[in-house]
Amino acid sequence: MNILWEIGLNLWKTLCEMSPYLLFGFIFAGFLSVLVTPETVQKHLGGRGFIPVFKAALFGIPLPLCSCGVIPVSASLRRHGSSKGATAAFLISTPQTGIDSIAVTYGMLGPVMAIFRPIAAFASGLLGGWLIDVTDKKHDFTTVNETCTGECCASGQKRNPITRALHYGLITLPRDIAKPLIVGLVVAGIISALVPENFFSETIRSGIAQMFIMLIVGLPLYVCATASVPIAMAMIMKGISPGAALVFLVAGPAMNAATLTTVWKILGKRATFIYLLVVAGTALISGILLDGIFNIGQFSSMHHIHELIPEWLQVASAIIVIIMLAATFIKPNGQHHHEHSE
């Protein structure tokens, strides 16, 4: 019982720390979803060449596409004339980060990580898209019947923009990430309660070795961009280097089974191999660079930002997030939400 109590306390503490930033990210993402729609993405990413690849990687950084949105929008890009490179760049950069995960990263891991994480996502998307584009000899276009029937992909033009933004940010997006977020919080609570202090730094002293381990851990363990943050913070507090934590933040969201299946289906075997190689390679290189920045800058703490938020606001935000997450499991009478998988 003591262990369960300790896990629960750590889970609650982590939730309080991230909730104010999570709510801010949800609201901001809601308004961004109105300004930058999947239709807008399709309009700008059509055609071949470097510019569409660049735009695709850039669009993916803040774009608040839910899990049901990333895969069908990527397939739609191909149907509307987008190159394999631009499609791949979008698929690589979008899952790694978003406006909500950037806000949570800033609050829990500090400004350096919050800046470095989207840069790594953009670089991996740009490199992966470019490599796939230059190795695409056939320039074929495959029609893929990936359709999004979820509410997150509906245009919702009948409602005014503010209503649509708030509905997406406070209802649709929380519903989309509820399960992985809960898993992430529980995993972070277990790590905080059961893993001894400085365990990783004492047993695995090499930063490179830590990065390879985090890469392997991130492959089968899928957590969304936001849910991966509390796990990364728990790892850092147990001795993992910031660079190794970044490797996990990149590998977890970007290399899940659903995305890899989509890459294989719409882009082919060669593109899937390049996708894996680029994501893994950029994750490791980014981790090494980040550790170098922290060593040079002598940063003493990555998780002090949350202390600027009053405790009452943290608790109030956590209660609101709990209510929002609980509401995602309540299905309206006569309706069954479409289950989405990332």
Image (tube, rainbow, N blue to C red):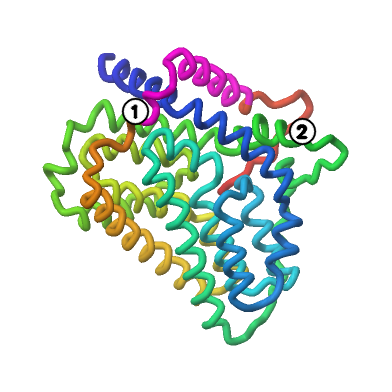
Mark 1 or mark 2: whose residue is earlier in sequence: 2
151 left or right of 306? right
Secondary structure found at label 1? helix
Give the image quarter of residue 202: top left
Is 104 or 251 nearer to us in this picture?
A: 104
Secondary structure found at label 2? helix
Q: Secondary structure of the magenta portion, mostly?
A: helix
Inspect this view and state whether residue 128 appears.
yes
Label 1 to label 2: alpha-carbon separation: 36 Å
Q: Name, please, the residue furthest toward the right.
A: 158
* In magenta stretch: residue 253: no
250 in relation to 133, above or below? above
- How many residues crowd around disc 1 within 10 Å: few (fewer than 14), some, or many (20 or more)? many
Give the image quarter of residue 71: bottom right
Is 150 or 231 nearer to us in this picture?
A: 231
The region drawn magenta spans: 305-327
> Mark 1 is on which residue type?
Gly
